[in-house]
């Protein structure tokens, strides 16, 4: 038997930071589906929202609650902001190379729906990549690459471990505590900004064990994405671009977002995404025979000097230049795409999965309640950091809940024998992505949601492989959650 003190599923910011808060004398195993950098953290551009100081905490809380449209857990939001200062201090002690000015002071930038500049960043627009590389270099625990979790070994209210598929075969791995940090649901959508490993399969495992997902209809679509690439994962153009002065315009240079919201480019993400989506639809309806470039929406980078743009946004500049754009002169065609799941596995305020003794969830796969109906920009990396640290403390008994390492049970499970993937599954995945994008996307209709539900149920009954079945269970939960909420709020917009 493979026995561990803690198994961590996922090697993004939440999984890595949890491992760094667990001492070296514990037997900890980190699992990642493929390569550790293939995670959403690695592709995060904007930064980490933190309270600038104690005086900024109330305003950070207020901004987060306002963005969340009345659906945030206020206690969780308070925890997020208050502990952001402790996390920032720890990251600085770990010598995380955040961007600083000539005097050595941290640089703060502003993003949509923030009242002040409070977002720290690293490597210009490469915050996620820099943070991920820095954290993984400090990990002393064992990390298995190419290890895909295929089952949670659960009986009653206890998780005994996980089944994994590796290049050497399938194994059952056992642990006293299991942490899920597996990311969101990007693979369910035709256009998305997520790493290709982000598949929602762990969410399906939660559902098949009669545990709860919460607020799954609350899906955030990033407003400014370059989608003219052949892959499902599209090129994110950071929120920070608009925070620093980039404009959203049509072919003729009109800044039409102000017709939708007085904050224009700095309105909350859901409003900006819906506005761009709506405006593009109107352009196509009014001028169906016009040249395609007149039916596009663009990001205008001309307010930047070339020197500033290449220094502040080196990753974006490099990627767009490689596609032939002359920057910052050329306008970049943009579209919304799926970006982030506000809902997830329901947890308490220390990351414990509701109804379980020793199973934790954190980061995007979890629903701690901090995001409500709409995530405030750059609160995502912060949530992964704050709640992974809290979960690690709980595992070590710091909260006095009696859930310590030594309180372990042991039992052995048979290795599951279900077929993981069948021949038709790849075609069905493409159909699912198309269905979710067009029927469960930015603007929803009850009739469209019912069509999507019917399509998912047909696929569930068609004898698919286990991994696709798990995705379908998650998709079904998203659709049913959207149907239950028959009024618009935050990112959930229903006609």
Image (cartoon, rainbow, N blue to C red):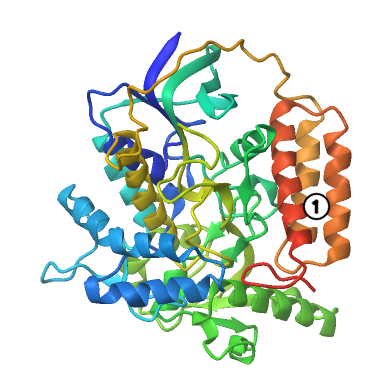
Of residue 7 and residue 282, the one placed in the foreground of this image is: 7
Which part of the image, by quadrant, shows the N terminus? top left
* Crowd band around label 1 with a 10 angstrom C-alpha radius: few (<14), some (14–19), many (20+): many
Q: Residue at x 37, y 32 (%)?
A: 403
Residue 420: horizontal and vertical position, in percent?
70, 23
Q: Position of residue 327 (x, y in %)?
A: 45, 72
Residue 246 visible to an observer of this rendering: yes
The spot of residue 458 in percent (x, y) is 89, 40
Compared across the picture, whether 181 is left or right of 120 comes to right
For mark 1, give the secondary structure: helix
Residue placed most toward the observer, 351 or 323: 351
Relative to 220, say whether 426 is above or below.
above
Q: Quadrant of residue 16?
A: top left
| Left-right relation of 151 to 468 | left
The residue drawn where x is 82% and y is 67% is 445
Quadrant in which the C terminus appears: bottom right
* Location of residue 77 in the rendering, given as x and y in whole percent from the top left corner: 41, 64
Q: Is residue 49 visible?
A: no
Q: Check disc 1 and report the residue beneath it.
A: 435
146 relative to 434 in the view: left or right = left
Q: Residue furthest left?
A: 103
């Amino acid at each position: 038997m493979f026995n561990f003190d803690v198994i961590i599923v996922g090697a993004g910011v939440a999984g890595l930071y949890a491992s760094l808060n667990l001492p070296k004398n514990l037997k900890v195993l980190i699992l990642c589906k493929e390569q550790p950098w293939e995670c959403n953290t690695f592709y995060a551009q904007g930064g980490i929202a933190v309270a600038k100081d104690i005086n900024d905490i109330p305003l950070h809380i207020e901004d987060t609650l306002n963005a969340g449209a009345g659906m945030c857990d206020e206690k969780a939001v308070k925890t997020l902001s208050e502990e952001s200062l402790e996390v920032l201090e720890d990251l600085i002690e770990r010598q995380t190379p955040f961007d600083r000015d000539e005097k050595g002071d941290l640089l703060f930038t502003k993003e949509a729906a923030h009242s002040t500049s409070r977002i720290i960043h690293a490597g210009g627009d490469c915050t996620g990549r820099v943070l991920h590389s820095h954290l993984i270099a400090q990990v002393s625990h064992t990390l298995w690459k190419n290890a895909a979790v295929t089952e949670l070994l659960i009986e009653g209210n206890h998780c005994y471990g996980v089944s994994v598929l590796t290049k050497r075969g399938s194994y059952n791995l056992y642990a006293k505590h299991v942490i899920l940090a597996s990311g969101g649901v990007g693979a369910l959508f035709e256009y998305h900004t997520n790493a290709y490993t982000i598949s929602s399969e762990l969410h399906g495992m939660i559902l098949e064990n009669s545990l709860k997902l919460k607020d799954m209809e609350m899906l955030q679509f990033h407003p400014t994405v370059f989608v003219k690439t052949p892959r499902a994962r599209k090129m994110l153009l950071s929120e920070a671009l608009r925070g620093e002065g980039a404009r959203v315009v049509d072919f003729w240079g009109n800044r039409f977002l102000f017709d939708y919201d007085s904050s224009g480019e700095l309105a909350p993400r859901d409003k900006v995404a819906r506005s761009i989506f709506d405006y593009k639809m109107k352009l196509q309806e009014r001028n169906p025979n016009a040249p395609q470039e007149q039916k596009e929406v663009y990001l205008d980078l001309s307010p930047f000097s070339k020197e500033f743009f290449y220094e502040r946004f080196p990753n974006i500049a490099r990627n767009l230049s490689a596609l032939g754009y002359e920057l910052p002169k050329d306008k970049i065609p943009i579209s919304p795409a799926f970006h982030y799941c506000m809902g997830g596995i329901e947890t308490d305020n220390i990351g414990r999965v509701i109804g379980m003794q020793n199973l934790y969830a954190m980061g995007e796969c979890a629903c701690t309640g901090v995001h409500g109906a709409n995530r405030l920009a750059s609160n995502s990396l912060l949530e992964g950091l704050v709640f992974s640290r809290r979960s690690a403390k709980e595992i070590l008994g710091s909260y006095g809940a009696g859930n310590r390492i030594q309180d372990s049970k042991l039992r052995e499970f048979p290795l599951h024998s279900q077929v993981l993937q069948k021949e038709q599954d790849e075609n069905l995945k493409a159909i699912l992505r198309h269905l979710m994008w067009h029927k469960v996307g930015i603007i929803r209709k009850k009739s469209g949601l019912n069509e999507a539900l019917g399509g998912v149920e047909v696929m569930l009954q068609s004898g698919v492989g286990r991994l696709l079945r798990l995705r379908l269970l998650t998709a079904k939960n998203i659709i049913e959650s959207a149907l239950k909420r028959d009024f618009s709020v935050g990112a959930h917009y229903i006609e």
